[in-house]
Image (cartoon, grey):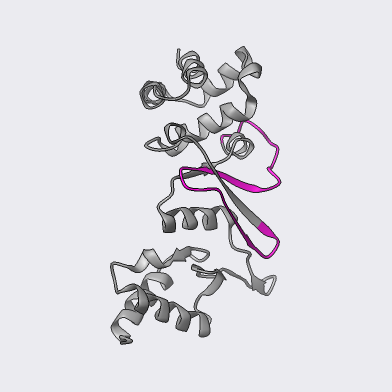
Amino acid sequence: MYNDTYHEKIRERITTSKRGTIFVISDFTDISPTPTIKKVLSRLVEDKTIRRVMRGIYEYPNYNAFLDEYVAPSPHEIAKALGRNFGWTIVPYQDAALNMLGLSTQVPASWTYATNGPYKEYAYGNVTIQFKHTSNKDITNLSAKFALIIQALKAIGRDKIDGDVIKKFSDILTPDEKESLIEETKRSSAWISGTIKQICA
């Protein structure tokens, strides 16, 4: 049974959020049962409050008055929403991690993420988002920054780690972060944990 109270609560959560916010069905399960959420979201798509990016992914669109068009949704925010929807931990993959840490100016050509979930690929418009399964010890129970550091080290490669690389990583960490990083990554592969000990020395 459709409930107007549920409709208003879901609509309010969306319209009080920042423009460009991405939503998935699980973002509203504290408000109503899943079948009702789906009906409400369909109606909100029909009245153009939100737009459907792909199946199960919705955006509270950001309109650019100067360009007289909607701003394209953020692939990174969509990737985070997909991870949230399926309960995956995700982190930008290798070269993207280097870029996000400010250690590379090269912008990755594709949106690729390491995850503790399965290998998956999603596409909308001309954007493709890829998820690559990785070892749980390199992603699960790590802070976002520390997971990025592991991916960045993998992008550089074990054989290319030198003093300059060690210093660059060391410079982006505070003393407290270094102490936590050693503890969080002690179960990582031997070369990763060994490199991190050098970074944090």
Relative to 30, say whether 154 is above or below: above
**Residue 97, horizontal then vertical, whole percent:** 58, 37
On whether residue 120 falls in the magenta region, the answer is yes
Identify the image quadrant of the N terminus: bottom left
State left or right for residue 76 relative to residue 175. Answer: right
* Magenta-tinted stretch: 101-127
Relative to 130, say whether 125 is above or below: below
Q: Nearer the viewer, residue 99 or 191?
A: 191
Q: Residue at x 47, y 34 (%)?
A: 135
**Residue 163, horizontal then vertical, whole percent:** 61, 12
Q: Residue at x 62, y 14 (%)?
A: 162
Identify the image quadrant of the C terminus: top left
The image quarter containing residue 13 is: bottom left
Q: Nearer the viewer, residue 102 or 157?
A: 157
On whether residue 45 falls in the magenta region, the answer is no
**Residue 196, horizontal then vertical, whole percent:** 48, 19
Relative to 164, say whether 151 is above or below: below
State left or right for residue 144 relative to residue 166. Answer: left
Q: Residue at x 60, y 35 (%)?
A: 94
Q: Nearer the viewer, residue 188 or 119?
A: 119
Image mark count = 0
**Residue 100, horizontal then vertical, whole percent:** 58, 39
State left or right for residue 4 relative to residue 137. Answer: left
Residue at the extreme front: 118
